Image (cartoon, grey):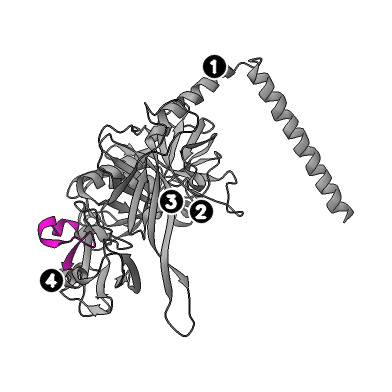
Amino acid sequence: MEKSKSGVCDWLSMKTLNVLFVIVLSAALAAEEIPLKGGLSARGLNEALVGVAERVTPAVAMVIVEGYQQVAHNPGGANTFGMRRAGGSGVIVSADGYIVTNAHVVTGSTRIQVQLSSNRAGAGRSVVRPPGPLMTARLIGLDAETDLALLKVDANGLPFLELADSDTVRQGQLVVAVGSPGGLESSMSMGVISAVARQLQPDDRVAYLQTDAPINPGNSGGALVDIEGRFVGINTMILTQSGGSEGLGFAVPSNIVRFVIDQMRRNGFVLRGEIGAEAQTVTTGLAAALGLPRDSGVVLADVLPGGPADAAGLKIGDIVLSLNGKPMENARQFHVNLYRHGVSSSVTLQILRGADTIEKKVVVLARSNSPERFASWVNERQHLVPRLSVLVLPIDGSIAELLGGAPRRSYGILVARLAMTTNGPSGDLLPGDIIYDVNNKPVSTMRELRAVVDMQKDNEPVVLQVERAGRIRYVEMRLD
């Protein structure tokens, strides 16, 4: 016990010293006694942060969602569901109302609303301002791999942020997180970039910007900007044991955001390219055990028979030196660079095979397991189910071959993509889902699905039985 008490006293002493240090430093900065690097004064830094607030907060909105969730479970009977109301943040990326947020903020929602910032230009000078306008938003697209979603509100002339080049972000630079933690709109917090390319798992295809700027629940989907107000990332997640910010925040870099929302604006979905090869980052262990000629870079661990890489003559064990002239340093870089090439285009790989350097031209195809690969099969006139806000396909022989595995049942309707032209909810439906039943009524044709859905009353629970990734689940919705 004495040791424990001593430890607490030592901690308190250190905490007291830290607080005194911060007070003294703050006072010195306020008096401009400590010049900052590059000639920027403390007052100049203060004015820079005020400028960031004035430029950025009008373009960051609060995202409010409604959806069903289980509120009670009866062991001997049915579950009880009720409406949930939750929120996050979103960044306006165009004057005509496109807003990017996190996919996890809107997944499962039956209604999405966006409350614009009250800090808009011309809103008055009162310290306490009225809430900004509340607008209905529709979901344009959702990408689970990057945890990004694109919304649209019917408005023009909105303040917006342009995406910066996240490749120029440096470790140690000051950044500001703007969002609505706990529903407190237009909140700012400051920190530094802790790491510029943090992968949470080896060979993850998303490398995050890591920051110690305080990020809390509700900040998801908000903006991470630099000291000049440039939009460098979307705040996405934290690592925490307490449930609150512990200085481990992560943002999707703006270059990935740009790629995703550009595709969503054009198509309503993200279609990624691949060449039928699995790449891994070369480690010293791999190099030593496999006898590779170098201990860094990218090695092909698999080449799928009959795929584009196989047709081009690539082999397992080839080391990829460059893709279209750009040096490849790790597997994530390799896959991300493939993403950026359109389907049916081609790329040139420089590879090292033994002592020989070879060039191979490879065709890029849509990723074989991507649910969005069905999106090109549908159009808004023929395949739309307006009240579900999805475009669907009957599962015939050709579609069944592309599913990658036999459906669990002999009937059903495939969700090909989310709709772009309706304000209705898509709920928790995702591309690739197979709809079997609506309120226990089986559906096997698009006509049956539309008829059953149209019979449902407004604002009453609708439960769909769907298959997703080989597993059957219920999806609860509310139709308008």
Task: Provide residue 226's location: percent of width, then percent of height.
Answer: 46, 30
Mark 2 is on which residue type?
Gly
Gap between marks 3 and 1 measured at Cα = 38 Å
User: Relative to residue 416, is residue 468 drawn left or right?
Assistant: right
Task: Please rate how many residues cluster around mark 1, counting C-alpha atoms within 10 Å: few if below 14, some from 14 to 19, many from 20.
Answer: few
Of the image marks 2 and 1, the number of the one nearer the N terminus? 1
The one nearer the camera, 76 or 347, is 76
Residue plotted at (34% across, 68% down): 476
- Residues at marks 2 and 3, CA–CA distance in whole angstroms: 45 Å
Residue behind mark 1: 40
Pick the front one: 67 or 19:
67
10 displayed left or right of 412: right
Q: Is residue 473 visible?
A: yes
Q: Position of residue 136 (x, y in %)?
A: 30, 48
CA gap between label 2 and label 1 equals: 47 Å
In the image, what residue type sits under mark 1? Leu
Callout 2 touching callout 3 (CB < 8 Å): no
- Residue that mark 3 sits on: 87
Pick out the residue farthest to the left: 382
- The residue tagged 4 is 447
First of labels 2, 4 by sequence position = 2
Sequence order check, earlier mark of 4 and 1: 1
Establish if 307 lies above or below 450: above
Q: Amino acid at mark 4?
A: Arg
Looking at the rendered structure, the secondary structure element under dot 2 is helix
Give how far apart the Cα atoms at labels 2 and 4 are. Answer: 58 Å
Magenta-highlighted residues:
375-398
- The CA distance from mark 4 to mark 3 is 35 Å
Question: Which labelled disc corresponds to residue 285?
Answer: 2
Q: Sequence-wise, which precedes: disc 3 or disc 1?
A: 1
